[in-house]
Image (cartoon, grey):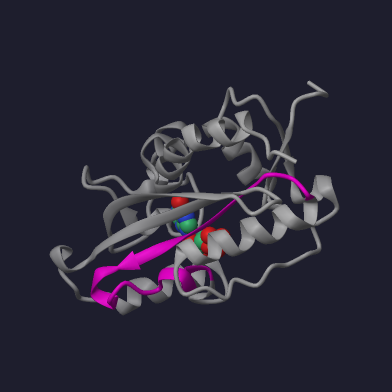
Amino acid sequence: MADLPRLLVATTNAGKLREYQDMLAGLPVRWVGLDDVGLAGVDVEETGTTFWQNALIKALDYARRANLPTLADDSGLEVDALNGRPGVYTARYAPTVAERNAKLLKALKGAPDEARGARFVCVTALATPDGLTVTAEGTLDGRIGHAPRGVHGFGYDPIFMLPDGRALAELPPDEKHAISHRGRALARIRPLLEYVLAHPPMR
Ligand code: IMP
């Protein structure tokens, strides 16, 4: 294992690192998180106005700091009735998860199902220390429910309804990963990642 190249995931969240390992299982890399490379305290400001910009900003910055190929993502929720908001501000929509969900339910109060369309978006970016970048986007369409449901997942999952009538928080992790915006973005970036890992920079 020791001679496998290291791949940094730009997160301090052990759960997210595990998700990446699960969804990209079988890649010939040694997975490391920001804690493992002494960058846990380094916050990169998300100054972009698109998911794509923010994912690239993070991947490039941490790749240079760690001198390692780095995966970063930016994700959020676009609500049709709010003209695509909260979008890149999804994590900053309100101070806590409970307040964010309550604020969104309130914003859509009284709206019928057909006016509650929404999608999760995730852009994953891979950057190498010498500046090579690739990105991939995944989306998951649904609508905002009327009350929280389900015990799985995190964030907005309890109020995000799938076309089959289940809330995203009612899906066990494997089932969510198979259809989620993040799962789709990672599935799309996988062959690009394999290519980049097989072609280290020429010096
Ligand atoms: P990020 O960490 O900057 O990408 O922020 C993502 C925001 O979108 C956070 O508020 C998350 O709670 C929310 N979010 C992203 N993906 C999901 C998901 O799969 N389920 C629920 N909330 C999500």
> For the point 42% across and 72% down, which residue is it?
102
Nearest to the observer: residue 159 or residue 182: 182
Task: Reply yes or no: does residue 90 show up in magenta.
Answer: yes
Residue most extreme to the right: 38
Viewed as shown, does residue 116 lie left or right of 73? left
Nearest to the observer: residue 143 or residue 135: 135
Nearest to the observer: residue 193 or residue 49: 193
Query: What is the tally of numbered marks visible in this picture?
Result: 0
> For the point 17% across and 69% down, which residue is it?
115
Vertical placement of residue 38 versus 46, above or below:
above
Residue 7's quadrant in the figure? top right
Task: Reply yes or no: does residue 154 show up in magenta.
Answer: no
Residue most extreme to the front: 203
Nearest to the observer: residue 105 or residue 57: 57
> For the point 49% across and 37% down, which residue is it?
192
How far across and down, in percent of the image, does residue 27 sit?
60, 26
Residue range corresponding to the magenta coloring: 67-91
How far across and down, in percent of the image, does residue 31 sit?
71, 35
Position of the C terminus, as image quadrant, is top right
Position of the N terminus, as image quadrant, is top right
